[in-house]
């Protein structure tokens, strides 16, 4: 076994399923996410992109489904707190209200970086939040709403 | 939301998704078109415009941002990178994510397409454990004329092949005068 990547119990974000050694992600990766969506739309159309998001939610984010299912809104809150701490230049507020968590994205880190980099943003870019969060929420017994997009949005997670 | 913090995880998952949909042809098309020509078009422009200087600028920024352990050297006719700890594959190993059979192929696929377009060719080896080396030279330069060429011999003490971890791998993929994954030696 290659042990040199396993040299510490250094999970910075216990509520994220996958952890890195650095505290914040590299913003240029948003360029690749945008390019991936553009490529998939060109190859398979909008429905192909939606299918990709759904399958990613069910398989890649399976540990998040488990976290939310087992811990309810507390799990959602922990995940969102850690998630946005690890994304560069994000500006969000996350509030607990009776029976729900409200996430207000004041500056979406991805849209911010894509605009700053002068990239053409896929019109389907924001569908990732809508479809992935919806799918994870559905499988966790949580109701999900989203309003807005392209840089600012409000998401509600209701139990 | 798909985050950039765990990018390498869902990127690798996407390889498997595309491979299952359309085989290596679709996956290679994704690496070349979506990554090489779209996502990394800033790298392509830099390298086309400024050659080795552009490579130095691009990898200096991106490998620092990704917290890689590497060294790069440049001499007449050759740009060389020795990667001692790939942050990208390292993320997968650390998190025990095994989505696609050869994650490392994505690099030679997109970099190969960018270099070919800019008039360069590549010698490269990766050991599937987070170590690799690259020598990029102009198409027109012969291997003998390039002072840093080291296909068969160790370049210096910082050559990744001189590290003990290099030989921990039971499979090393080799590319010579390569432009992409089709050039992997059998």
Image: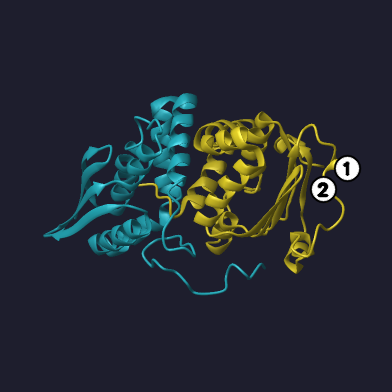
Chain colours: A cyan, B yellow
In the image, residue A97 sits, relative to residue B142, either above or below, namely below
At x 76%, y 41%, the residue is B184
Q: Is residue B96 left or right of residue A131?
A: right
B50 or A112: which is nearer to us?
Answer: B50
Residue reaching furthest bottom? A8
The answer to whether one can see residue B93 in this image is: yes
B140 or A88: which is nearer to us?
Answer: B140
At x 58%, y 35%, the residue is B44
The C terminus of chain A, quarter of image: bottom left
At x 60%, y 33%, the residue is B49
Q: Where residue A78 sits in the image (x, y, percent)?
A: 29, 63
In the image, residue A117 sits, relative to residue B84, either above or below, namely above
Q: Where residue A17 sits in the image (x, y, percent)?
A: 42, 60
The answer to whether one can see residue B169 in this image is: no
Provide the chain ID for the residue under circle 1.
B
Q: Quadrant of residue A123?
A: top left
At x 57%, y 37%, the residue is B46
Q: Which mark is residue B144?
A: 1
- Labels 1, 2: one chain: yes
Provide the chain ID for the residue under circle 2.
B
Q: Residues within 10 Å of mark 1 (few under 14, many from 20)?
A: few
Check whether the beta carbons of the residues at disc 1 and disc 2 lie within 8 A of each other: yes
Residue reaching furthest left? A98
The N terminus of chain A, quarter of image: bottom right
**Pointer 2 residue:** B149
Total numbered circles: 2
Q: Where residue B38 sits in the image (x, y, percent)?
A: 51, 32
């Amino acid at each position: 076994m290659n042990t040199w990547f396993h040299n510490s119990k250094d999970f910075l974000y216990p509520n994220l399923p996958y952890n890195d050694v650095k505290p914040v992600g590299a913003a240029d990766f948003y360029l690749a996410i945008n390019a991936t969506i553009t490529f998939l739309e060109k190859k398979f159309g909008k429905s192909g992109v939606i299918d990709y998001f759904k399958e990613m939610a069910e398989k890649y984010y399976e540990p998040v489904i488990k976290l939310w299912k087992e811990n309810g809104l507390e799990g959602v809150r922990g995940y969102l707190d850690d998630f946005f701490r690890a994304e560069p230049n994000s500006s969000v507020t996350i509030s607990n209200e009776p029976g729900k968590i409200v996430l207000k994205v004041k500056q979406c880190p991805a849209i911010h970086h894509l605009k700053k980099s002068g990239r053409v943003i896929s019109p389907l870019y924001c569908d990732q939040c809508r479809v992935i969060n919806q799918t994870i929420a559905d499988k966790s017994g949580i109701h999900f709403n989203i309003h807005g997009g392209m840089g600012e949005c409000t998401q509600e997670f209701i139990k | 939301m798909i985050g950039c913090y765990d990018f390498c995880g869902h990127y690798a998952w996407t390889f498997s998704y595309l491979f299952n949909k359309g085989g290596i042809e679709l996956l290679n098309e994704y690496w070349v078109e979506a990554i090489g020509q779209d996502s990394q078009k800033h790298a392509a422009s830099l390298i086309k415009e400024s050659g080795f200087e552009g490579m130095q600028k691009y990898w200096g920024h991106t490998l620092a941002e990704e917290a890689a352990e590497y060294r790069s050297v440049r001499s007449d006719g050759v740009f060389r990178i020795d990667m001692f700890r790939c942050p990208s594959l390292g993320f997968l190993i650390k998190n025990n994510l095994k989505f696609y059979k050869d994650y490392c192929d994505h690099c030679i696929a997109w970099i190969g397409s960018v270099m070919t377009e800019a008039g360069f060719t590549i010698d490269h080896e990766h050991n599937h454990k987070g170590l690799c080396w690259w020598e990029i030279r102009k198409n027109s330069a012969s291997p003998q004329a390039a002072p840093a060429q080291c296909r068969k011999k160790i370049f210096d003490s910082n050559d990744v092949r001189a590290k003990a971890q290099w030989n921990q791998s039971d499979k090393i993929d080799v590319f010579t005068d390569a432009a992409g994954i089709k050039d992997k030696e059998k």
